[in-house]
Image: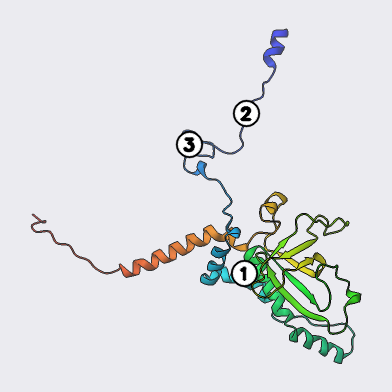
Amino acid sequence: MARNKQALRRTAQATADGYENFIARVGMQTPNQHSASTYRANFTSRNRMLVEWSYRSSWIIGEAVDAIPDDMTRKGIRITSEIDAKDRGILESQLDELQIWDALNDVLKWSRLYGGAVGFIMIEGQAPMTPLRPETIGKGKFKGILPLDRWMIDPVLTRRIKDMGPDLGKPEFYDVVTTATGIPAWRIHHSRLIRFDGVTLPFQQKMTENEWGMSVVERIWDRLTAFDSATVGAAQLVYKAHLRTYSVEKLSQ
């Protein structure tokens, strides 16, 4: 009886889900070309110059980056609150004079192109590294928004926001690293920045990108190069689409 019970005991067997046909070599676990397929990161977002060249040269990438920001900022906003019509006109004219919509458009575009960008809220007479308090902003002190892409500013990863809320764990300060344009080497408090990430990433992948997101170009890169290769190859055939003859003496004999 004990032997029968031991015979009935089942041992764990390694299994794999999915359809397979070993005779026809069909399925992911059989020896065929498809079973060797996999996915690897191409890290296109880290190659700044390649991303910039593709943005300048490819109309598809240009549209992928520009379409949404242009649509968001083309007409600005419509103020519907019950404020005086004169005050509404002054506010709208100030938005145009300070080029707020153009600046936000650039921040959104560069966040999608590079994977991250910020808009620095410029307040005259205030230190950038101090927290922004709206009640301390004097009349005429707001000077606009300065777009800074991820390659122009670095998050300070040793200082984190510890207050409970949506910003918990994010960098408290950012350092300006591109000073050749005349921008001082400021350390800026996060409250003075409007931050946008391109494609948000899970935690471990975000760490590899200096805590920025991913460029929208990266996901479509392989399909785009395949498309361009096919269209350019087809165009090349046009130059070869002419009649060529080759004669061999006494070939018909």
Q: Amino acid at mark 2?
A: Ala
Can you give x and y, in whole percent of width and height, for residue 251 in the image? 11, 56
Q: Is residue 191 visible?
A: yes
Q: Is residue 72 visible?
A: no
Within 10 Å of the Cα at label 3, are there few (<14), some (14-19), or many (20+) other Cα atoms? Answer: few
Q: Earlier in the sequence, mark 3 or mark 2?
A: 2
Q: Earlier in the sequence, mark 2 or mark 1?
A: 2
- Identify the secondary structure beneath mark 3: loop
Within 10 Å of the Cα at label 2, are there few (<14), some (14-19), or many (20+) other Cα atoms? Answer: few
Task: Identify residue for label 2.
Answer: 14
Q: Nearer the viewer, residue 135 or 107?
A: 135
Q: Earlier in the sequence, mark 3 or mark 1?
A: 3
Q: Nearer the viewer, residue 90 or 16?
A: 90
Residue at horizontal 75 percent and vertical 58 percent from the top: 156
Q: Nearer the viewer, residue 41 or 151?
A: 151
Can you give x and y, in whole percent of width and height, for residue 224 in the image? 52, 62
- Identify the secondary structure beneath mark 2: loop
Within 10 Å of the Cα at label 1, are there few (<14), some (14-19), or many (20+) other Cα atoms? Answer: many
Can you give x and y, in whole percent of width and height, for residue 90 in the image? 82, 89
- Contact between marks 3 and 2 (CB within 8 A): the answer is no
Task: Identify residue for label 3.
Answer: 31
Q: Residue furthest bottom?
A: 86
Task: Identify residue for label 1.
Answer: 65
Q: Quadrant of the N terminus?
A: top right
The number of callouts visible is: 3
**Quadrant hosting residue 131:** bottom right
In the displayed structure, does residue 143 sit left or right of residue 225? Answer: right
Q: Any mark on residue 101, and which?
A: none
Cα distance in 3D space between marks 3 and 2:
18 Å
Q: Residue furthest right?
A: 135
